[in-house]
Image (cartoon, rainbow, N blue to C red):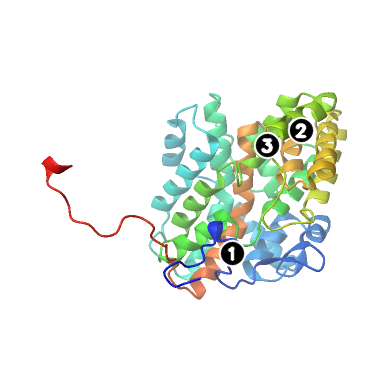
């Protein structure tokens, strides 16, 4: 390969852009780890709040540290009257991801430490974002239905508060556990598209609100965070397990994309899928509706047998959220409420040892040429 024709890595496949201590997929065990802990172990032994603390501080909290962390988050849940007014004026047809992206940008303008990009200020702003994002998501969702917002409750856990903000009530413990597990599984995943977007913005010296706003914009795409919504739309289009094989065969015939399958990092199956599937199955039992999980099982079996492609996290997360009662457009905003933890960890890490991210492009357009006069164009 000559210097004039460099090797182009489309999609930056296989490119190591930086070092990180936040997370890694361990090749020996095919396990996603946060700060060295396998995510499936964290799901069974820790709360989402504990995992958020781990991502931001490098170690799991003791009881006092966890209590302080939860108190700090709970104290910041309310959003301003000004933001409530802005949210009320959002178009009712707006996608909730557009709503939360705009709300986070508004929060940045309001934040008293907006211009302070020191690590201490960034950590305080991260807590505020973790606390306020669920409030804004729920307020926008309810406003789109003509409903008044529910005020956050500082006495509730993160998950309890989220359900209360959206539905005005807290579900049974089995539902809360499944939701908590989903938040842990979605919290972080190395240099994915939205995380790298947040790091890139941070590398310019921008504040965390700018970085998170950009991350949300990247996450909306159906090839990234929006896939969990696409999965549920797909399952509803299929209708049930009896129609699944025939539906999938038509997709094969047209070489069409099947949502919720395949992953850039995992070649032998997404390590998060068994845990999320376990809790999606529990949700099916709680609700008494196995249609979506049975349809999913048929699809996964046929995809593996005929294409040797495994499902990714979005595949069981979509029906799990639907069975919890969430409207499909809320699936990816829930992802945001979780991933703010991973994004913030990377923003802090990028800023601590920063260099402006500025790759090169190999130009293949016309050689330099003169501008012709108007009558010769």
Residue at the farthest bottom position: 353
- Identified at 76% across, 33% down, the residue is 323
Q: Vertical placement of 83 versus 58: above or below?
A: above
Residue 345's mark?
Answer: 1
Residue position marked by numbered label 2 in the rendering = 323
CB within 8 Å, label 3 to label 1? no
Of tags 3 and 2, the one toward the viewer is: 3
Q: Vertical placement of 152 versus 328: above or below?
A: below
On the image, the x and y values in percent for residue 232 come to 70, 33
- Identified at 78% across, 62% down, the residue is 31
Specify whether 324 is left or right of 132: right
**Separation of marks 3 and 2 at Cα, in angstroms:** 30 Å
Disc 3 on helix, strand or loop? loop
Instruction: Give the image quarter of residue 82.
Output: top left
Q: Quadrant of the C terminus?
A: top left
Residue position marked by numbered label 3 in the rendering = 255
Residue 75's mark?
Answer: none
Specify whether 371 is left or right of 280: left
């Amino acid at each position: 390969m000559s210097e004039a024709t460099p090797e182009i890595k489309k999609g930056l496949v296989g490119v190591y852009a930086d070092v990180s201590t936040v997370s890694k997929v361990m090749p020996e065990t095919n396990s996603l780890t946060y700060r060295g802990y396998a995510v499936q172990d964290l799901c069974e032994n820790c709360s989402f709040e504990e995992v958020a603390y781990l991502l931001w501080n490098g170690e799991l909290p003791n009881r006092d540290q966890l209590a302080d962390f939860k108190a700090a988050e709970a104290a910041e849940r309310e959003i301003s009257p000004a933001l409530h007014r802005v949210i009320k004026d959002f178009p009712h047809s707006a996608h909730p991801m557009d709503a939360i992206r705009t709300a986070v940008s508004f929060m940045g303008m309001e934040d008293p430490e907006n211009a302070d990009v020191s690590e201490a200020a960034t950590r305080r702003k991260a807590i505020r974002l973790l606390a306020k994002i669920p409030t804004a998501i729920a307020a926008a969702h309810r406003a789109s239905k003509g409903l008044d917002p529910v005020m956050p409750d500082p006495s509730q856990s993160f998950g309890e508060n989220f359900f209360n903000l959206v539905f005005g009530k807290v579900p049974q413990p089995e539902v809360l556990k499944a939701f908590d597990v989903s938040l842990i599984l979605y919290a972080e995943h190395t240099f994915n598209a939205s995380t790298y977007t947040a790091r890139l913005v941070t590398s310019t010296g921008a504040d965390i609100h700018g970085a998170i706003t950009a991350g949300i914009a990247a996450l909306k795409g159906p090839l990234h965070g929006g896939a969990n919504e696409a999965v549920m739309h797909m399952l509803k289009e299929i209708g049930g397990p009896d129609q699944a094989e025939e539906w999938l065969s038509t997709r094969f015939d047209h070489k069409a994309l099947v949502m919720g399958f395949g992953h850039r990092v995992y070649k032998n199956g997404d390590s998060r899928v068994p845990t999320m599937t376990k809790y999606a199955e529990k949700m099916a039992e709680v609700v008494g509706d196995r249609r979506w999980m049975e349809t999913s099982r048929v699809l996964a079996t046929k995809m593996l047998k005929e294409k040797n492609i495994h499902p990714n996290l979005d595949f069981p997360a979509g029906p799990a959220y639907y069975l919890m009662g969430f409207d499909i457009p809320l699936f990816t905003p829930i992802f945001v409420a979780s991933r703010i933890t991973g994004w913030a960890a990377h923003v802090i890490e990028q800023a601590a040892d920063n260099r402006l991210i500025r790759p090169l492009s190999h130009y293949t357009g016309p050689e330099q040429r003169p501008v012709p006069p108007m009558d010769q164009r």
